[in-house]
Amino acid sequence: MKAEQLLQEAKSYEDQLVRTRRYLHTHPETGFDLTETLAFVKKELTEMGYEPKECGKAGLTVLAGGKKPGKVFLIRGDMDALPMQEEADIDFPSANGKMHACGHDMHTTMMLGAARLLKAHEDEIEGTIKLDFQPAEEIFEGSHDMIEAGLLKNPDVDAALMIHVMAGMPMTAGTVVVSDGGVSAPAADYFKILIRGKGCHGSMPNNGVDPVNVAAHIITALQEIHARELALVDEAVLTIGTIHGGTAANVIPDTVELGGSIRTYDEGVRSFLKTRMTEISQGIASTFRAEAEVSFGSGCPTLVNDNDLSACAVKYVQELLGPQKAFTAGQLNAMSGSGKAPKAAGSEDFAYVSQEVPSIMLALAAGHPEKGYCYPQHHPKVKFDEEVLPGGSAVYAYTAMRWLEEHK
């Protein structure tokens, strides 16, 4: 299979890809509640000749190839949106209070484009390609749910790849940045701290136990973990994002709830943070005659990129798009003079896959600020350049086929 041929085939689907993306964009759904999205994706795949299989609460998989012996390569695209109102200046905005502000509509579209390419070249696939349409990435639950349901089995997956579009990147639309080997995205954990005091009239605090005061001391103390208990090299962020408590200015409430998140690049640091957060919160609460309950909700581990797969991916994408459209993160930073590839601050639940099989994360530039794509992911005004859809589809398909060809 020639790279140029595959890319031209992908470009011939451009109008169809744009229509697909706009349908998905105007019908955003969140978490595992993807009724319309799943029905649409199933219909598209079935019409291509695939037999979609449900996986977990709301995931879908299909297999391409399998006519020749070989390994199994997984490509993943997530399908869920965010619970936020769209404000982007486009002709096809969402109107249901949800929004594809992270570009997952682009990912799903490119996966469907890849599925079409792979079906057309199925006889050439040296092994099997498993296509993973994943729900609930934004809440860090979809990938783990699908793995528990057998995503990486029957047939057993040997390597995996994901692509994430990036808005507002100062580089030509369609440029691909391949992660270097090692950790590229942090582990993430959401937490809640419920502080139980004793409500009373605000004029008589001696008759109660003030959970607002306790919350203030806990917030301050938690920041001391980073300042005084972690080493210089222990990169971590602890953020309190919500505080809920009380309904009247002259009343001390019974409870206050804090909500936040932590991000870490090391599993040992992650575990330490959780332990110390619990100890500090409960200790301070006890000091002030209150109680504190610390709970950790959905999260994901660090995303680890495989060294060999990183080297292979950049080679394959350069074959497909040309040497000026594909770089490793380290190469890109060397060209800019900074030398070292930065780690991403945003977490990604594809990390669960990366903990099980050799994996690689690719970033696809999908909007230059000078062309009006000024807002980042998760902003209500973010826009993505649909020009990248054919290239992204081809990158999914070509990278998978080339890896199988070279790893018989």
Image: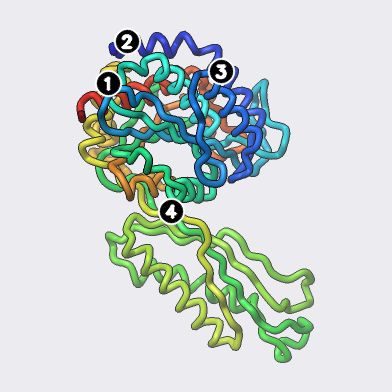
Q: Secondary structure at mark 2?
A: helix
Question: How dense is the environment of label 4, judged by Cα within 10 Å: few (below 14), some, or many (20 and up)?
Answer: many
**Upstream in the sequence, badge 1 or badge 2?**
2
Q: Secondary structure at mark 3?
A: helix
Tell me the residue that label 1 is attached to. 318
Marks 1 and 4 close (CB-CB < 8 Å): no
Does residue 161 appear in the picture of this structure?
yes
Q: Is residue 369 above or below residue 16?
A: below
Question: How dense is the environment of label 3, judged by Cα within 10 Å: few (below 14), some, or many (20 and up)?
Answer: some
Does residue 175 appear in the picture of this structure?
no
Which-is-in-front pick, marks 1 and 4?
Answer: 4
Q: Secondary structure at mark 1?
A: helix
- Going by the numbered disc 1, the residue's amino acid type is Gln
Tell me the residue that label 2 is attached to. 4
- Going by the numbered disc 3, the residue's amino acid type is Val
Mark 2–mark 3 distance (CA, rounded to whole Å):
21 Å
Q: Which label number is shown at residue 300? A: 4
Marks 2 and 3 close (CB-CB < 8 Å): no
Marks 1 and 2 close (CB-CB < 8 Å): no
Tell me the residue that label 3 is attached to. 18
Q: Which label number is shown at residue 282? A: none
**Upstream in the sequence, badge 2 or badge 3?**
2
Residue 366 drawn at (x, y percent): 46, 26
**Upstream in the sequence, badge 3 or badge 1?**
3
